[in-house]
Image (tube, helix red, strand yellow):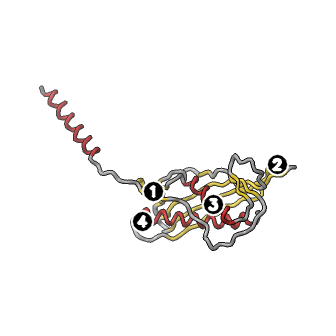
């Protein structure tokens, strides 16, 4: 009889535990687009070469859709109820493509699998996208390699770029996801502007 009573009490405890999980309030995740646009008034160039853009990669830790921040002690934090609408590297690639097209410095910007002939090939990687809470800035960084196809030597490296940009974020603590997302998008815009200037010397 004592053993049976113990089973009943254990079963009741499990039932209460299950109810507590079921009754938890659902938190709707916030989703933010990572899609900085080239300033409308920026100078547009007239290029004649074509550029093939390969898929943008991401260093470990940057591929997550969750908004990331770095605490003053160097540890990382993620906003589990705030995320990008697409993986950051994928969004950065699309933003870079739109940015280069809007600049006009190439006659055509080709995608992987295109049958078009490319004068230059761009390989890029997103290496940083977070908010540095200790410094009070949003950080974005990308690296890129520009390749040139030659009939005599094949594919050769024409240039390498490494660009980083920071944007101040409000000093409020805790910093909300709206400000984090806006700061990181602005920092990425700074990186894309610098990559445009790098590419312009080879277009």
Mark-to-mark CA distance, 2 and 4: 50 Å
Specify whether 173 is left or right of 168: left
Q: Which residue is mark 3?
A: 98
* Mark closest to the chain's N terminus, 1 or 2: 1
Q: Which residue is mark 1?
A: 31
Specify whether 84 is left or right of 203: left
* Mark closest to the chain's N terminus, 1 or 4: 1
Q: Give 55 or 184, whichever is nearer the viewer.
A: 55
Mark-to-mark CA distance, 1 and 2: 43 Å
Residues at discs 2 and 4 in contact (Cβ within 8 Å): no
Q: Which residue is mark 2?
A: 154
In the image, which is nearer the foreground, mark 2 or mark 4?
2
- Where, by quadrant of the figure, is residue 157 drawn? bottom right
At mark 3, the secondary structure is helix
* Mark closest to the chain's N terminus, 3 or 4: 3
For label 2, the crowd category at 10 Å Cα-Cα, with few meaning under 14, some 14 to 19 and many 20 or more, is few
Q: Give 139 or 194, whichever is nearer the viewer.
A: 194
Q: Give 4 or 107, whichever is nearer the viewer.
A: 107
Mark-to-mark CA distance, 3 and 4: 30 Å
* Residue drawn 29% across the image and 49% down it: 24
Question: At which x and y percent is residue 65?
Answer: 50, 52
On screen, residue 126 above or below 45: above
* Mark closest to the chain's N terminus, 3 or 1: 1
Question: At which x and y percent is residue 64?
Answer: 51, 51
Residues at discs 1 and 4 in contact (Cβ within 8 Å): no
């Amino acid at each position: 009889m004592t053993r049976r009573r113990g089973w009943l009490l254990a079963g009741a405890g499990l039932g209460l535990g299950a109810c507590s999980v079921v009754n938890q309030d659902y938190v709707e995740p916030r989703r933010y687009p990572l899609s900085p646009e080239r300033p409308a008034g920026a100078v547009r160039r007239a290029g004649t070469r074509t550029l093939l853009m390969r898929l943008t990669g991401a260093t470990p830790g940057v591929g997550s859709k969750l908004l990331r921040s770095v605490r003053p002690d160097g540890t990382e934090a993620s906003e589990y109820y705030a995320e990008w609408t697409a993986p950051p590297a994928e969004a950065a690639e699309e933003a870079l493509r739109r940015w280069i097209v809007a600049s006009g410095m190439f006659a055509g910007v080709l995608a992987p699998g295109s049958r078009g002939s490319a004068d230059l090939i761009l390989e890029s990687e997103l290496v940083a996208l977070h908010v540095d809470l200790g410094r009070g800035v949003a950080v974005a960084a990308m690296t890129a390699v520009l390749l040139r196809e030659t009939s005599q030597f094949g594919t050769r490296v024409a240039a390498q770029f490494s660009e980083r940009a920071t944007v101040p974020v409000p000093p409020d603590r805790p910093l909300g996801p709206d400000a984090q997302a806006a700061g990181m998008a602005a920092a990425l815009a700074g990186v894309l502007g610098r990559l445009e200037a790098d590419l312009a010397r080879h277009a």
